[in-house]
Image (tube, helix red, strand yellow):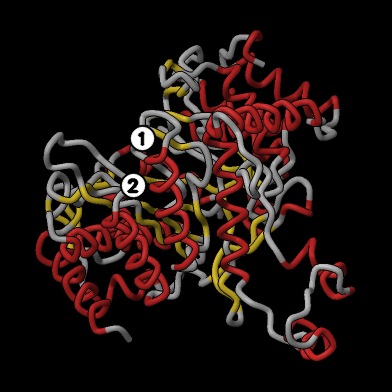
Amino acid sequence: MNENINKIHDASMKILNRTGVRFHHPEILKLLNKNGIKIEGETAFFTEDQILNWVGKAPDHFKVYARNPKYDFIVGDTKGIKHIEFAPGYGAPNILERSGVSRRAVLKDYIEFTKLVHQSDQFKVNGGILVEPCDLNPQTNYAAMLYHIITLSDKFIFGMEGRKSQVDMTMEMIKMVFGSQEELINKPRIMTIVNTLSPLSLDATALDTILSYASHGQPVIITPAASAGFTGPISLAGLIALGNAETLSGIAVTQMIRPGTPVVYGCQSTAGDMRTGAFVVGNPEHALCITLAAELARYYHLPCRGGGAPSDAKQISVQSGYESMLILLSSVKANINYIIHAAGVADSFNAMSIDKFIIDLELIDIVKRIHRGVQVDDETLALEVIEKIGIGGEYMTSAHTAKLCRQAVWSPKIGLKGPKEVDDQQAVILEKVKRQKETMLADYQQPQISASLQKALTDYLLAKGVEKKHL
């Protein structure tokens, strides 16, 4: 095992044992105490044996199930295969327009992104907080968003972190669609992110979410997002050790609630900008944190989550391109199993951009091609073709080229290639982006859902106070 990973593990064990983790939740504190964890006030102190025992109860991989079985997928590594799945942006309150102007997101934006995600073959998952609509009631907004995910898409459902009332509504709706708690445990139908509160805390919202999801056997992604120099040490080794302690303590709690609950080891930690105090994501430190987190996850035999294609850029630009590719390619190179924020994220997670979403789909296609690598066999080595054409010949008219040309070489949908001159390349690319978005929305067809189920969901939400105009 990598010596550096062993050192980070040892440091995390010392943090958990000496400093501890604060849990802002009486029920969770009682659960920890019941299982022999030392408690002082709201702070829990773990021994290494305790942490490894509980974390060891989580599966090293698991399968999740969509309403449409063609979107089922595995999270984690199996028999030497490092499965990689992508999910769109999550959590942004704003929409970034092409002009560079940012505005608050509304439900109409959420619905449009839901349809675009459904149309893209880069994703088997849909939902979560694609954007956070400001025109919804904060008490019922997650339930309203979930309604549109269920009715507008049949991909696997990405859920949302929330207080007890919010996650209770989530589970009630999911059971209306997929059946009892036991059926959900047998076939996980919804997965969500739970963010730790760095440094070394889990708040009531995170723990309410963990309680509900784990008791129903639904997967939880435990993710710290510490900022070096602000909510974690300025040195990356210390930052990762701190985040590792937070993640492991959260995973241990999921297993105390229900042993065997599927969990994902998450990390979205990065370096802060020491000049402005901003949380930034398009930097080398973010890429390095992703790489170390993937190694730590495999050290504990857990699936991993991290990265995406985020950028700190305030508009579509050279910066948004190179930062997004840096983080996305680093994520795939690290074999991150579940890559969230893979399309659309701008302005340091503060905004979603439809233009960037479409461009990021092309980035995902590029990194998938790189990840597949080079196939080496008798046909691809092409020795007979080389011998036949010989020295000084050409391959353009060969049967071998004609047979493989559409699959051997990657071709862009958005980017420009070849010698053709254009006056304004950026304008041409953005026009292609616009046309692709319009085509995807025009081709969208709502998946079938029974009238009785849709009525049951509508009646439930109306009874909970969701306005009819939002359904």
Residue 205: horizontal and vertical position, in percent?
35, 37
Q: Nearer the viewer, residue 222 or 370?
A: 370
Res. 279 image quadrant: top left
In this picture, is 340 found above or below 300? above
Mark 2 and mark 1: Cα distance apart in space: 8 Å
Residue 455: horizontal and vertical position, in percent?
78, 21
Residue 168 visible somewhere in the drawing = no
Q: In the structure shown, which secondary structural element does the residue marked by tag 1 occupy?
A: loop
Q: Which numbered marker is on residue 269?
A: none
Q: In the structure shown, which secondary structural element does the residue marked by tag 2 occupy?
A: loop
Q: Residue at x 12, y 48 (%)?
A: 229
Q: Earlier in the sequence, mark 2 or mark 1?
A: 2
Q: Residue at x 78, y 54 (%)?
A: 70
- Quadrant of the image for the C terminus? top right
Q: Nearer the viewer, residue 140 or 6?
A: 6
- Quadrant of the image for the N terminus? bottom left
Residue 54: horizontal and vertical position, in percent?
37, 70
Q: Residues within 10 Å of mark 1 (few under 14, many from 20)?
A: many
Q: Nearer the viewer, residue 281 or 453?
A: 281
Q: Residue at x 50, y 33 (%)?
A: 129
Res. 432 image quadrant: top right
**As shown in the figure, which amino acid type bears the numbered disc 1?**
Ala
On the image, numbered disc 2 is attached to which residue? 282
Q: Nearer the viewer, residue 372 or 186?
A: 372
Residue 198: horizontal and vertical position, in percent?
22, 47
In this picture, is 201 found above or below 17? above
On the image, numbered disc 1 is attached to which residue? 313
**As shown in the figure, which amino acid type bears the numbered disc 2?**
Gly
